[in-house]
Image: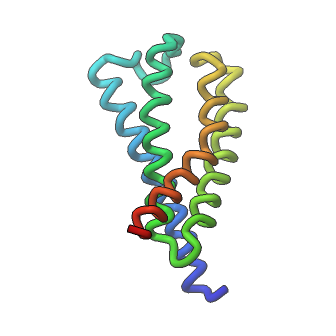
């Protein structure tokens, strides 16, 4: 692979990853400031609040897959898959680190791991369908 293409591929995946992270943490911060969520560092055991967080993370993960596919220099679905693998690995590490801390229900970080790959691929598929039209 040509070095320039490698940098563009890496950039596409990183752009999708940062889109998910920035959107997720930005929304978290707004909900903390509005006192919907408890202060940072305090446990959040309310299932409704965890479902809310999961709901917007689902949307943002699809967006990340779309962004990655959109900026991929070639084979957008392979790039969306790469983002999904990154999300799966980062999510698994986060679950392993946070579940013992008791910051919330165990199902929440596990759900983040489970959704990473299919939702980034959905984002890539949405990009592909948009390109076909």
| Residue 13 as seen in the image, left or right of residue 35 | right
| Residue 110 as seen in the image, left or right of residue 63 | right
Q: Is residue 25 above or below residue 98?
A: below
Q: How is the image coloured?
A: rainbow
Query: Where residue 117 sits in the image (x, y, percent)?
Result: 63, 48
Q: Nearer the viewer, residue 118 or 133?
A: 133
What quarter of the picture does the C terminus occupy? bottom left
Q: Is residue 3 above or below residue 48?
A: below
What residue is shown at x 51% (from left), y 78% (from top)? 73
Query: Where residue 131 sits in the image (x, y, percent)?
Result: 42, 69
Q: Quadrant of residue 52?
A: top left
Q: Quadrant of residue 80?
A: bottom right
Query: Where residue 7 sits in the image (x, y, percent)?
Result: 55, 77
What residue is shown at x 67% (from left), y 45% (from top)? 88
Q: Is residue 119 above or below residue 10?
A: above
Q: Quadrant of residue 116?
A: top right
What residue is shown at x 58% (from left), y 18% (from top)? 103
What residue is shown at x 64% (from left), y 16% (from top)? 102
Farthest-out residue, top: 46
Callout count: 0
Q: Nearer the viewer, residue 130 or 112?
A: 130
Farthest-out residue, bottom: 2
Query: Where residue 76 sits in the image (x, y, percent)?
Result: 55, 68
Q: Nearer the viewer, residue 126 or 51?
A: 126
């Amino acid at each position: 692979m040509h070095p320039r293409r490698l940098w563009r591929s890496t950039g596409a995946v990183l752009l999708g990853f940062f889109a998910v992270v920035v959107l997720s943490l930005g929304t978290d911060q707004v909900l903390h400031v509005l006192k919907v969520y408890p202060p940072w560092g305090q446990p959040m055991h309310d299932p409704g609040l965890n479902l809310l967080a999961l709901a917007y993370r689902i949307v943002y993960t699809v967006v990340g897959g779309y962004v990655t596919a959109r900026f991929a220099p070639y084979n957008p679905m392979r790039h969306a898959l790469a983002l999904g693998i990154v999300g799966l690995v980062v999510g698994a590490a986060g679950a392993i680190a946070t579940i013992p801390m008791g910051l919330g229900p165990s199902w929440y970080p596990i759900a983040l791991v489970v959704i990473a790959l299919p939702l980034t691929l959905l984002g890539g598929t949405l990009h592909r369908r948009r390109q076909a039209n």
